[in-house]
Every structure is written in C-alpha cells, then in structure tokens.
Amino acid sequence: MRVKLVWVWLLLGLLPLAGCDRPAVPPAGGRPLVVTTLFPLYDFTRTIVGDRMKVQLLLPPGVEPHHFEPRPEDLLTIQRASLFVYTLPAMEPWAARLLQGLDLRHLRVVEAAAGVRLREIGREEGGDDEDAPAGPHRYDPHVWLDFANAQQMVEQILAGVVAVDPAHAAEYRDRAAALKARLVTLDRQFREGLSSCRSRVVLQGGHNAFGYLARRYGLTYLAAEGVTADTEPTPRQMVALVQQVRARKAQAVFSEELVSPRLAETLAAETGAQVLRLNGAHNLTKEQFERGVTFFDLMEQNLQNLKQGLGCR
Ligand SMILES: [Zn+2]
C-alpha cells in the first residue's frame, strides 16, 4: 500500500526517532546498513562494500521507479541506515523532499549523480512530464546509462562508504577501482559493437530512458513516451511513430523492462519489425533478483539486442 508523503510526515512526527542516543553505526546484524533506491546504485554499492555492510534495495522487485512513493516502513528503514544512496532529485523527487525532513546527524547521504554531465530534454522529445523539476531546464534522469557517468557514480558511492567506515578504506577503493575498470571495458564493448551497423536509429516502444546511451555512441533515439514512463502516446503520435519505423526501414522495435511490451508489439505488428528488449536497469524482477542478475548482465544483453536489431557487424 502506498501512502502519500504527507501522512508519512505525520507518522514520523509521532515517533521517537533519531536522537543523540543513537549509535553512529546502527547494528544490522552487526554491520552498517546502506539503503539504495535504484538497482544500479544497489549493484555498485554491494560490489564496493563486499560483506562489510548490509545493502538494501528500497524499491521492491518489479516496481517501476518513476512513480514510487516511499511507504512508512521505508522511512523507518532509512532512519536505521548509516548511508542512503539515491540518484538525483530529477530521478527521485520524493527522496529530495524526504531528506529535508529527516534527522541527518547519523545518516550520510550520497547523491550519486552529483556532478555528472546531465542531458537536457528538449520539448520536442520529452513530452509533458509532470514529475520533471520546475524551472527552465528539465534533465533526463537516466544518468547511469552513460557508462562514464556510471564511473563517476561509483566514485560518489565510494566516498560515502569510506566516510561510514574509514578503517577499511583501502579495501573499498580497490573494489571501486575494479568496478570502474569493468565499466571502462563495457563502454569499449558498446563503442566497438555499435561502430558498424546497418541502422543507427533506435526506436523504442516505451519511455525515453536511453538518451544518454544514444548520445554516447552516436545513435539516433526515438521513444514513444516521455522520460517518466507516464505519457501514453496519442493516436496521432502512434501514426507518426509507425511512419518513422517504415521510413527508416527499422528492423526492430525495442521494448522496456517492468512494463507491458504492448506498445512495442503494436508498433512491430504495424511495421513487420521484430521486438527486442532494451533493459534500462531501473529495477529487477523478483526472478532476476533471486538469480543475482548484475548491472553488467543487463547491459551485455542490451548490447547483444542492439547489435541484432540494428544489424551491426
Ligand atoms: Zn526511466
């Protein structure tokens, strides 16, 4: 059950939380607790900390994150944590609001995407996103899908982890360095794998999540929906998309994770293109979670599907 944040505030106001008597490192089976919002943050954090901390993914498996509102028990979990890792306010507007109301004396907060090069969304491609921050600039929140940004996020997470447990800093730095090296390799695999393709146009029958990836590898990216997965295309936009698929002789339409592939299937049926999956890695399904799927597993599968759908050598 989801509860509006205002009720959560009221609830928290009534609870005896977070005083001076709280230990700096609350016990979680003896280990500090790290709470992360999205799956990439969870996966990077658990790689860096190894067994020294308990890492918890706040999003329940299978939940689409753009409309996530924390439940009362989520707030209590965050209050117990030593470290809270989120992406940035454009991705988790609820987190920015929530942090304003928390006692932060014993909770370190990492805004993992702080300092990354954000991609501005043009009116022509973004649609109308009610969740977008106010102001003249609206930014694409899917920063982790640019693997150079992902390396910077690893650095931000590392700094938070080291601040919580400086005694094991060398160990954390070694693991973070290995993780960044894997991201460098992944970036090279994408650059090489997508260098020679029949088509450079990625048509997505889903929300606008891959703008960073497309920018990095020189692909043209057209998505049926805006950046927050809540704007269904109008019939007129659907007709325009079908025309795009035909005009560009696209062989594939890409579907996304955690939502119905209906839109991609409709586009594919109209145009004879095949449906392939592009996974934005916001979150995992329960089955993937239990199988221990990693960020790299998802991205390597994405590369295979892109190469197939775009006809890359
Ligand atoms: Zn998204």
Image (tube, rainbow, N blue to C red):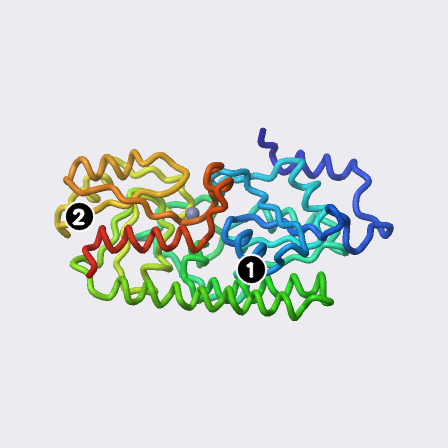
Q: Position of residue 37 (x, y in %)?
A: 56, 48
Eyeballing the image, is 32 above or below 259?
below
Which residue position is annotated with label 1?
112
Estimate how packed mark 2 is, as few (under 14), some (14 to 19) or many (20 or more) residues with alpha carbons within 10 Å: many
Q: Position of residue 15 (x, y in %)?
A: 79, 37
Identify the image quadrant of the N terminus: top right
> Closest to the observer: 235 or 309?
309
Which residue position is annotated with label 2?
251
Q: Quadrant of residue 73?
A: top right
Mark 1 or 2 closer to N-term?
1
Residue 197 located left or right of residue 65: left
Q: Quadrant of residue 184?
A: bottom left
> Closest to the observer: 140 or 122?
140
Element marked by disc 2:
loop
User: As shown in the figure, which amino acid type bears the numbered disc 2?
Assistant: Gln
- The total of numbered circles placed on residues is 2
Q: Position of residue 62 (x, y in %)?
A: 47, 37
